[in-house]
Structure formats: structure tokens, C-alpha cells
Amino acid sequence: KTGVVGTITNGEGGSIGLRADMDALDIAEQTEVGYASVIPGKMHACGHDGHTAMLLGTAKYLTQTKAFRGTVQLIFQPAEEMAGGGRVMVEEGLFDKFPVTQVFGMHNWPNMPAGKMCVRSGPSMASAASFEVTVLGKSSHAAAPHQGIDAIMVGSEIVSSLQTISSRVTNPIEGIVISVTQFNAGNALNVLPDEAVLKGTARSFSKDASTTLENMIRRIVENIAQAHGATAELRYEHLYPVLINSQKESELALRVAEEIVGAAEIDPEYLPSMASEDFSFMLNERPGCFMRLGSGFTDRETFPLHNSRYEFNDDVLPIGASYWARLVETLLKP
């Protein structure tokens, strides 16, 4: 719940922010590494420990070399994983207390080979919303379904119909995803339950598409429930906005990345991701960009983010730290 900001100043000049997330996930770790989590049910399955280490390495280098003129704000952010720690830091006056004109973030990307880097301007990661649907029907004996209103059947029809939004309502080019991730109903083999609860996420790359998603989900939920004589309640919450990289900062970051890893290691096939990232709240306040740093292993199997066997590739630590340090030295050149 607690964020940390470290300030390094070397004379008069501009001020930029570098952000690393710190939190772990509610996953039981199944790796065999020496630094595996010792807290049951918790692990760094997204590499935020690596992000923190890279930023600490950058801080050490900058304080030793001081080959820049100005101020660097080192933003160590808590609660990125669905808790919106970035939003809270911004709302609590992050950039008022620690002024910056630009802000930069980075994330390891295990489905890219270690050392590859990529960034581009414009929408880079999707917005995210959560929804919860409670279907209220009428319970009955499983042998006499006509005497009740089957909440499971109503809920199942809602799940199927939600997928028509992306295939039949919105422009396919828009790029939206609706995923129902939980469906809970009933507790007896011979009883049709009177309640079903569905939960899921909705993601898109524009504010208009996000509004359309909410409106269509609400319409489908209400109309299907009404058609079966049931009622349904929808709770919809917008979590993260679209992460949009600003053009000037993205072009600069790309040039710096090329200096660190070479032009051959810049991934030209970079595509936006439907995953979400609360660094978007900071980019809504200041221009900047979010770099992807490849962290896939070449000598053994690479497991994806949020997997119980995920490992951060330590070989990319100096690459990430060097990128951030060179970014500072470029932007705050004496």
C-alpha cells in the first residue's frame, strides 16, 4: 500500500520520472530458484522484483556518475496488479510533490527473446473494466424445471451473447475482448438454483469502444434476464484507461534503446497488447512512454507472466538499468 519516491538531483535542469512497480501476485510459486518466495500463496510472477532491481541499479549508477544536470524522480509504485496503485499515487499528488515534465516506465516481456526492446507511440495497452452480473431467478427441483426460473440457463445465455459484441456489434478493427472468468451457481445436485453470479473483464483501445462495451453488456444482461422472467443486476467498474505512449518520448526512447542493444535487437513487429497497466494513469498526466524489454530464455523453457513457474531473466537486469540511465543522460544532458 505504500509507494516510495527517491529524488536524485545534480544542479539546475529539467526533471523526469522513472517508474517501477513492486507488488507480487496471489499465486503459489512452483519454481526452484534460490530466491523463490517464502510467503505461502504469494510470488513475483510478473517480474516486478526485477523492475525494482533495475531501477535501484539505475539509482546507484546515477548517484556515482552524475553525468546529468537536473532531477530524477525514482517512482517505486505499489499495487499495480488490479489495485490501481498508480491511480492512487497520482490522486494523492505524486507530480505536485515530485514535479516532472516526462515519465517513463518499462516491463519485462517473456514472449520476446531476452534483450529485444520495443516501443511505439499511440495506444500500447488496453483499458480494463471489471463486471459482475447477479442473475436472480426462482429455484425448483431439478426434475421440475418448469416450476422455476433457472438462473444457470439465464447466466449461460448471457455468457454466450456477450461474445456477439466483438463479432457482430463493434468494428473488428477496434480490438476488444470480453472474458467471463467466473461463473458460480448452486450447491445441490438436485436443485436448480435461484441465483448465478458471473464475473469478468472487458478491454478495449479507445474511450468510445469502452463506452460501447459497457452499454452493450448492460443491454444484453437486462434483456436476456427479462426474456426469461428473471432479473439481473450489473456492477461495472472502469479500472484502467488505455495506455498511450506520446510520440516525442517514444521516438526518443527508441533511439536510446538502439544505443543500448543495437538496431538489430529492436523488435519491428511490436503490436499493442490487450493486457492493461496502471502506468496509464501517470501517462494521462505527463508525456512519456512504456518500454517492453524482452526477457525470454534461450536455453530453457520460458513461462509466461502470471504463471506459477515464471522466472525473471536476470540477464536483462543490466540492459534495463542501462536503458534508464542512458535515458536520463540523454534528456538531462549537461
Image (spheres, rainbow, N blue to C red):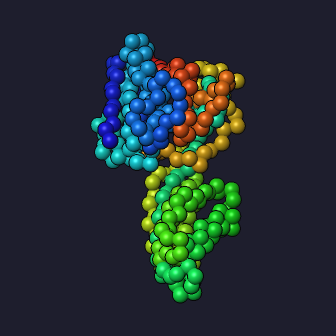
- Residue 97 picture location, percent across and down: 29, 37
Looking at this view, name the residue that lies furthest to the top: 65
The x, y position of residue 13, in whole percent, is 37, 24
Q: Residue 168 vs residue 207: left or right?
A: right
Quarter holding the C terminus?
Answer: top left
Q: Position of residue 262 (x, y in %)?
A: 65, 21
Above or below, 96 against 72 in this view is below
Q: Nearer the viewer, residue 53 or 292?
A: 53
Can residue 247 be seen?
no
Q: Residue at x 69, y 68 (%)?
A: 168
Residue 95 locus on image (x, y percent): 34, 39
Question: Visible in this render: residue 238?
Answer: yes
Question: Which quadrant holds the N terminus?
Answer: top left
Question: Residue, x 30% and y 45% (percent of image)?
Answer: 92
Q: Residue at x 61, y 35 (%)?
A: 303
Name which quarter of the figure residue 4 lies in. top left
